[in-house]
Amino acid sequence: MRRPNPDAAESHAKITRRSLLLGGVQLGFIGMLGMRMRYLQVEKADEFRLLAEENRVNIRLIPPARGEIFDRNGVPLAQNEPSYRITMVREDAGDVEQVFHRLSNLIELDPDALDRARAEMRRSAPFLPVTIADRVSWEEMSRVSVNTPALPGITPEVGLSRIYPMQEDFAHVVGYVGPVSDYDLSKLEDPDPLLRIPRFQLGKVGVEAKREDALRGKAGTKRVEVNAVGRVMRELSRREGVQGADLQLTIDQRLQSYIQARLEGESAAAVVIDCQNGDLLAVNSAPSFDPNLFVKGISVADYRALTDNKYRPLAAKSIQGTYPPGSTFKMVTALAALEEGIVSADDTVYCPGHLEVSDRRFHCWKRAGHGNMSLQTALRESCDVYFYQVALELGIDKLSAMAARLGLGAKFDLPLSGLAKGLNPSREWKESVRGSDWVPGDTVNASIGQGFVLASPLQLAVMTARLASGLDIVPRLVKSVNGVEAATPQANSLGLNENHLRQIRQGMFAVSNHKRGTAYRSRILEDGFRMAGKTGTSQVRNITAAERAQGVTKNKDLPWERRDHALFVNFAPVDDPKIAVAIVVEHGGGGSTAAAPIARDITLQALHQGEPPLAAYPRRDRGKIEQQQERLRRILPDRHGNRQDRA
Amino acid sequence: MSYLEYNVKTAPTGLRKILFLNWPLILLLAAVSGVGFMMLYSVAGGSFSPWAGAQIKRFALGLGVMIAVAMVPIWFWRSISGAAYGVTIVLLILVEFMGSVGMGAQRWIDLGFMRLQPSELMKITLVMLLASYYDWLPAHKTSRPLWIAIPVLLILLPTALVLRQPDLGTSILLLTGGAMVMFMAGVHWGYFAAVAALAGGIVVGVFQSRGTPWQLLKDYQYRRIDTFLDPSSDPLGAGYHITQSKIALGSGGWTGRGFMQGTQSRLNFLPEKHTDFIFTTLAEEFGFVGAFSLLGLYALIVVFCITAAIANRDRFSSLLILGIGATFFLFFAVNMSMVMGMAPVVGVPLPLVSYGGSAMLVLMMAFGLVQSAHVHRPR
């Protein structure tokens, strides 16, 4: 059944015409390609053959030695260690399996590594060396070297590998290096050709990653002549690269190692900063991990152990963790009130144990109330109601402005991974993020560092250093690059009334030196070393009505994850502040019992640049401290970084 | 003539269809792929792994797919061409948002067992849709502006998406391939002249935009164009590819250095020696004779497509065959021009020879369509 279709014949004829035309063009182009081929391969053949002969000069990269990292006194924190590996050239070896067998009589060979080597040999050209054993000891290396005549094709080679002599003490600061991954390459628009060298390592976290630019150095090149099958015949010329720059950190290794040992068993963070120039003397997070594991390639089991640990060893709590600062924030409230003229040193507020704000009752930690409180006594005894009252008159805008001046909510420019910004809440912040208006109850919570306020231990240390010095201290981590002193940020006056600052410092002095101070038991007795501090205990949960009814408010009755964080900040010596310290013990309970004693030990250790005399401690504690010092002495690495066995 | 007019009884049915396949064409495809296996074996240093073995498996799979596609009546393929185009566009948009990033360009969706490159698939579905469009459109309307605007948009949409990835090579193939189908469908030649003039203007625009915030290509693409224009400007950087590939080609001479005796491609002077630059290995090892023979095989495939299209009185079938033939032509023409220093390095593989799963499978599928059109042609 056919429909008459006048178009059909006409359109088919058109397609035929057009396709013949286009086919002609295509064949014409193919002819042109053929002509070009003839031109290149027949007419120019001699010329290109000559060029191909010259094309035997190959350019190879020479990887630079990575810069090393030292502490402020020149103690090595990250070094390069010669590492030995054994390679084999298939075509020289002849019977590969027999050479493997002979080699296994000399040194221990990993069967997996051998399988990998066999697979690599099948893939690559016969004259290319393939690694069959990596990280071989010097002894094994010598055994192989002596026997090379019996081991055709085997070459012992020397390379450099990264080692961290301080092990877990600097894992969170220095970080570690690892092999270049596809992910690393994908992040870079135009990757350094060095990164494509097999076995090349680059910084993954911490200073190693953030100062990769300085540490890596520049590749050198060598021009080598290769023969027709690509074997290197001789080296023609060599341009040395630039070695990576050595970095010196502001950290004091002895202090850092001491703190790490002191924090053992806790999930805690500690920061020690120089009050006058902002040098970070110690940045600790406990528990920690051994970065050397990551350099070699960590086993799944080891890695699981780290990630499953509820104390989170991989997190750098001192810089990445943010906590409600609790009562350590009270200096901010007090200073803002003094500066705004809302209170003077002598004004008192009556504390009945609670304060009603818009139908809500805010309790003081001391249910019975403190009675009449002045600024100094309120700081000393950490009375909450005093700060509630003052903050209500002050308002959040001025409170948050003062917090910002003291460095809360600021992200400092430090070469560390995952620096936390914390949270210095303001009206605008709540509107844009929470979508609701700021209410007076929020100000009340903020006045004692609860509610929305979050700060990292680093920020708390900076805050304390600024209070102690009155300068706008900015933390610094890198002391020098290749021996050239890094610029110290010029510390200028914060422009705060010196008299007001003195009131705050006196309040803090009373905390750890007055009989009624919250940290009196952690006082320092030694003259010229006395410290001024502030305790903090921050809730990580809301106490439910049911709990309150049952009376379960004691921390020790709660599961670990729900206990309060213990905080302490301090500076010392009180007359001539040199260092500021911030401690957070996660879920440690009260700041005065869990954090203050650690802060005292650290302060004394830092000021004495070593073990302090027992006389610095209150008589009652000396026995206990002596035992502790004895124990820590055993675990601490000696000056050369040789670590004794950890008990 | 439309498929409604077929005398169905004379068309072969069932497995008998196999006898009616265009067997010479299959032999040609197998011969070209065989050249590919040999070269992949050679660049791997005389080894089936990692490339040649995998490529052989893919060819076997592709052959199966081709025969399966050929068994299905061509009118079925015509009826799904719109849907196929739509699905491919959706996939292209998906790679924009969830595709893996490979070599700085988003090109594929990971299906687990293989990586699907929607841009490869687009090359056939676009030709299918254009062929069925011109089959449906009455011939006298072919050159009216409105009826030209529609296919132009159908071509530009995927071209723009692919260019965004960015994959310059494939977008050139889509654009030129689509234009060729329109030309063969009988669109007035004046339009093509106008577009050619416009293209000249765009080239100027691309160069003018360089360095400005709205520059049209990525920096590396500009660098490739630069070095095409003057390879000696950067002999160890980006100009390296072109210079090295010309040296490798030229040093082959009349008869080449012999199988597995190539030095240039072996010494790692050439990057991507198993994909885009595989032709240099052939040219070096088998010389002008080998390279010209491959070109001859390609030319024969193009000729087979054209004669099959002319012999086929179904409008959809002949346009489809011509479109696929033209796309195939563009593949090797662009790749060879690039390798021989006649065009910038844009990243188009040598069809059936270069290592690559998506391209091989999609090409075999396309030739399956050609076979289906051939088997089910009106008699």
Image (spheres, rainbow, N blue to C red):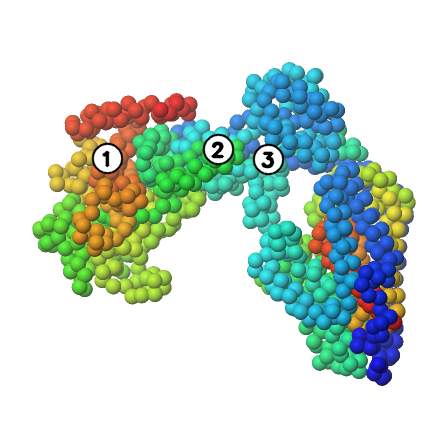
In space, the residues marked 1 and 3 are separated at their CA atoms by: 46 Å
- In the depicted view, which residue is nearer to us: A244 or B273? B273
Find numbered disc 2 in the image and state the secondary structure of the residue it sits on: helix
Give the secondary structure at mark 1: helix
Q: Chain of mark 1?
A: A
Asked whether residue B235 appears in the rendered view, the answer is no
Q: Work out whether residue A114 can be spotted.
A: yes
**Left-right relation of A381 to B315:** left
Mark number, residue A228:
none
Query: Dot 2: few (<14), some (14–19), or many (≥20) neighbours within 10 Å?
Result: some
The relative height of residue A143 versus residue A64 in the rendered view (above or below) is: above
Frontmost of labels 1 and 2 is 2
Residue occupying image coordinates x 30% and y 24%: A631
- Mark 3, residue position: A199
Q: Amino acid at mark 1?
A: Pro
Disc 1 to disc 3: CB gap under 8 Å: no
Q: Quadrant of residue B257?
A: top right
Q: Amino acid at mark 2?
A: Leu
| Mark 3 and mark 2 on one chain | yes
Compared across the picture, whether B325 is left or right of A206 comes to right
Tag 1 and tag 2, C-beta contact below 8 Å? no
Number of disc labels: 3
Which residue has dot 2 on it?
A: A293
Chain where mark 2 sits: A
Q: Which mark is residue A597?
A: 1
The quarter of the picture where residue B191 lies is bottom right
